[in-house]
Image: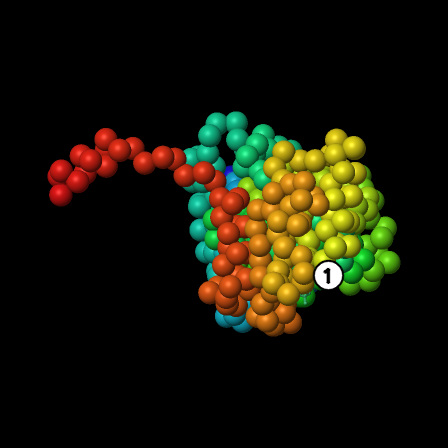
Amino acid sequence: MSRLLLVTGDPEYDTHFRKAVQGRLPGEVQTVFSTSLPATPDELLGRSVGELPTAVVLGPGVDLYEAMRLVGVFDIQRPEVSLVLVVPADMSLAVAALRAGFRDVLDMDADSDGILSLLSRVCDAAASRRWAMPQGAVVAGTSYGMPSTPRDDTRVIVVTSPKGGVGKTTVATNLAVGLGAIAPMNTVIIDLDVQFGDVGAALRLAPEHSLTEAVTGPAVDDALVLKTFLTVHPASIYALCTPANPAEGELVGAAQIARLIEQLSGQFQYVVVDTAPGLGEHALAALEAATDVVFVTGMDVPGVRGLRKEMDLLGEMSMVPEHVSVVVNAADRNTGLSVKDIEATIRTPVDHVVPRSRMAAYATNRGEPLLLHAPKDKAARQLQGIVDSFAPARPAAKKGIHRKAMVRS
Ligand SMILES: Nc1ncnc2c1ncn2[C@@H]1O[C@H](COP(=O)(O)OP(=O)(O)OP(=O)(O)O)[C@@H](O)[C@H]1O
Ligand SMILES: [Mg+2]
């Protein structure tokens, strides 16, 4: 017995579809007449009556963009329900739909026999999948495949500085890209410079969604919906950029940021946070959840003094995360200030010194982080050192086993 849920804005297609399957495929068909889709699978499935459908067919009229977004969540939350997209005769759209996670695509012009044969195949495959699933996994109203306990090894790394223009975004974006090589698709960068954030520009992204959508609506209650609002960068990282309108960013509150970081740290191994200069409410909300802080300073007296004050203030508020590192960026011998002078002022060792490099500014302007654009550049090597300091510790080599291997060879 198969239960089919058709979603379409086209009553004629509904008639055609029903004629093709009713009485020819055991089971029943229900139709939702709509062109827009809800944000979560369960909201959509909730529109059908009775048991969970075997397959959901997104028919003509349905918003394709929403369909592509929903399918990613469907596959994780409801793998037992097959999602089929009805597409016009367009090979590239069909391929895009299958890549996005649809189980199958149905030609919009398919005749009755075509519809029947495709849906029989889809329903058979769904039945075998359900059979193979752990018992009790297929329960209406319950998410399947969602991690029940959030991961506890996440590093939340906040990049901060008291002054502007010292290289926070440069450090944060390169760090994220470098961590993407260590933890592909398990690293996310969040831009918390809510008014004038430029992570999107530094990574040359054209985000379809921004921070605002990630901290309002259905994303707040569902980390998988939240994930659909992130933008993927080719370096195998996700990014959450600021809204294009600075006024919109200002509407985001500290509590929303706290919730956002809580959700992302349940899903990702590395959460890198870029911030606006100083300790605004968003930076403080991030620092409260941070495991690591990276302080960035240039080689100038006001900047270094500002950093000392920022460190003192965080100490007074008991908000210094477990791991602290200090980066001196755009380092230059001709400033009259040495790294030793900086360490004496901030009373903390400097961990990384990133030299001034023409390539750094060039990379920013191209929207390609230095680690990707010019990995051999002198500044890139130091940025890579920052990345390496966050790599999981390698287990020590087992000498005995190694020796045995050598004897055998
Ligand atoms: N090591 C470096 N050598 C030369 N230029 C650099 C270096 N690091 C960063 N820059 C350049 O300095 C400028 C400011 O850098 P960035 O945007 O990273 O600073 P920021 O601290 O994020 O600034 P803001 O506070 O405005 O967000 C950019 O044009 C960047 O390319
Ligand atoms: Mg910045």
Q: Quadrant of the C terminus?
A: top left
Question: Residue sitting at 70 percent across and 45 percent down?
Answer: 345
Residue 67 in view here:
no
Crowding at dot 1, Cα within 10 Å, few <14 / some 14-19 / many 20+, comes out as: few
Left or right: where does residue 132 sit relative to residue 48? left
Identify the residue shown where x is 77% and y is 49%: 306
Tell me how the rendering is colored.
rainbow
Task: Examine the rendered structure and indicate whether residue 281 appears above or below residue 195.
Answer: above
User: Residue farthest to the top?
Assistant: 136
- Please name the residue shown 36% across and 35% down the image: 396
Residue drawn at (17%, 40%) of the image: 406
Q: Amino acid at mark 1?
A: Gly
Q: Looking at the picture, how far across and down is residue 332, in whole percent?
A: 62, 63
Label 1 secondary element: loop
- Tell whether circle 1 marks a residue whose Cβ is less than 8 angstroms from ligand 1: yes
Q: Percent from the top left, x then y, of residue 183?
A: 49, 47
Viewer-closest of 38 and 162: 162
- Counting labels gives 1
User: Residue 229 or 364: which is nearer the viewer?
Assistant: 364
Q: Quick check: 191 above or below 369?
A: above
Answer whether residue 117 is visible to the viewer in this image.
yes
In the displayed structure, does residue 160 sit left or right of residue 313?
left
Residue sitting nearer the eye, 407 or 189: 407
Residue labelled with disc 1 = 165
Q: In the figure, is residue 161 to the left or right of 27?
A: right
Image: 259 above or below 68? above
> How far from the left and from the top, in percent, is residue 6?
63, 52
Q: Position of residue 282 (x, y in %)?
A: 78, 45
